[in-house]
Image: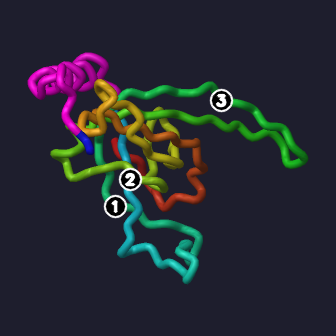
């Protein structure tokens, strides 16, 4: 049986959300563009994979978030050097709820002149450990190649 926390009123949670929103949107100001996979325009086979090997994407969303960029790692194999890197993005759940947008696995992030494919999306942090007070959406992504994406021109 889930109950509300006794010592944390909703007003305190709302204050916490508004302070975080102002910090992310007005002070830090990190912005990414996210492109969602278009289910209607992507032709898939019986396994759910794109038939022609290329996914189609909808128009991008511009979203404020916090970004943790992990240092690139150089992998050397018989085909040459390959640079791999990953990033984590942290969204404020209340700012996502009004937009009708939610990040999902397979979405593409355009940030810092590279494209990143989202691998996982979680809601890991709870205020006072209560599931009703989830305020963060975290996604992890890896750098992807432009050759596999149908983008001819980047957003300016």
Residue 13 x/y as whole percent: 17, 25
Q: Secondary structure at mark 2?
A: strand
Mark 3 lies on residue: 72
Where residue 45 appears, as percent x and y from the top left, is 55, 81
Residue pointed to by mark 1: 58
Image point (48%, 61%), residue name: 150
Question: Where 130 falls versus 54 (above or below)?
Answer: above
| Scheme by which the image is coloured | rainbow
**First to last magenta residue range:** 3-30
Height in image: 46 above or below 37?
below
Q: Earlier in the sequence, mark 3 or mark 1?
A: 1
* Residue 52 place in picture, x, y as percent: 57, 75
Q: Is residue 96 left or right of residue 149?
A: left
**In percent of the image, x 49 and y 37: which residue is there?**
113
**Left-right relation of 56 to 132:** right
> Does the rendering let one see residue 36?
yes
Q: Are marks 3 and 1 in contact (CB under 8 Å)?
A: no
Name the image quarter holding the N terminus.
Answer: top left
Residue 48 is marked as none
Front-most of residues 104 and 131: 131
- Number of disc labels: 3
Residue at point 75%, 32% (across, down) = 74
Q: Quadrant of the C terminus?
A: top left
Do tag 2 and tag 1 residues touch (Cβ < 8 Å)?
Answer: yes
Q: Earlier in the sequence, mark 2 or mark 1?
A: 2
Relative to 13, residue 118 above or below: below
Spatial CA span between label 2 and label 1: 6 Å
Q: Mark 2 — residue?
A: 35
Horizontally, residue 40 falls left or right of residue 115, namely left
């Amino acid at each position: 049986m889930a109950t509300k926390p006794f010592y944390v009123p909703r007003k305190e949670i709302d204050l916490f959300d508004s302070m975080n929103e102002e910090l992310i949107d007005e002070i830090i100001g990190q912005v990414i563009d996210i492109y969602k996979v278009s289910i209607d325009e992507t032709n898939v086979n019986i396994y759910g994979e794109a038939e022609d090997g290329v996914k189609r994407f909808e128009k991008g969303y511009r979203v404020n978030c916090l970004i943790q960029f992990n240092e690139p790692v150089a992998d050397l194999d018989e085909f040459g050097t390959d640079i791999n890197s990953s990033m984590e993005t942290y969204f404020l759940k209340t700012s996502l709820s009004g937009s009708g947008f939610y990040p999902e696995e397979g979405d593409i992030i355009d940030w810092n002149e590279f494209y990143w494919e989202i691998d996982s999306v979680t809601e890991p942090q709870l205020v006072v450990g209560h599931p009703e007070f989830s305020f963060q959406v975290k996604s992890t992504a890896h750098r992807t190649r432009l050759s596999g994406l149908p983008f001819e021109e980047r957003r300016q």
